[in-house]
Amino acid sequence: MADQAAKTLELTGDQDNFYALLDGSSRCAICRRTLRDPISKLVAVGPECATRYGIPHTMEAANRRLELRKKLLG
């Protein structure tokens, strides 16, 4: 378990990897508000936080994150 935690922390050093590994299926990974729309659930960040922090909030961004998540987690 410790090895897996260390590997996850190592992967989050890259910004794209960090966002890909966020779990936002129900709440925003930044502010913890409930996510209501499908794109927010896929990118793990609500639209307001995405705008505030410059995080892409589109279906294209969601698809890229899902592909990267698959690659990182096997």
Image: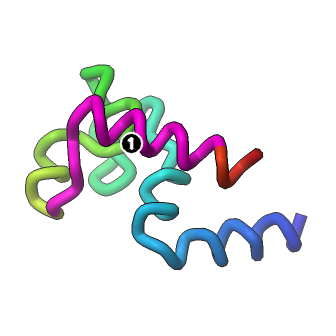
Q: In terms of image quadrants, where is residue 26?
A: top left
Residue 24: percent from left, percent from top: 44, 40
The residue depicted at 66 percent of the width and 48 percent of the height is 71
Horizontal side of residue 42 vs 33, given as left or right: right
Asked if residue 74 is positioned above or below residue 42 in the image, the reply reads below
Q: Residue at x 25, y 21 (%)?
A: 37
Q: Nearer the viewer, residue 74 or 41?
A: 74
Q: Is residue 3 magenta?
A: no
Main secondary structure of the magenta stretch: helix
10 Å crowding of disc 1: few (<14), some (14-19), many (20+): many
Question: What span is colored magenta in the figure?
Answer: 54-70
Q: Amino acid at mark 1?
A: Ala
28, above or below 7, in the image: above
Q: Secondary structure at mark 1?
A: loop
Closer to the camera in the image, 46 or 10:
10
Q: Position of residue 12 (x, y in %)?
A: 55, 70
- Image quadrant holding the C terminus, namely top right
**Side (left or right) of 68 relative to 16:** right
User: Which residue sits at x=66%, y=54%?
Assistant: 72
Q: Quadrant of the N terminus?
A: bottom right
Residue under label 1, please give it: 44
Which residue lies at the image location 62% right of the left edge and 70% below the top edge?
11
71 vs 19, nearest the viewer = 71
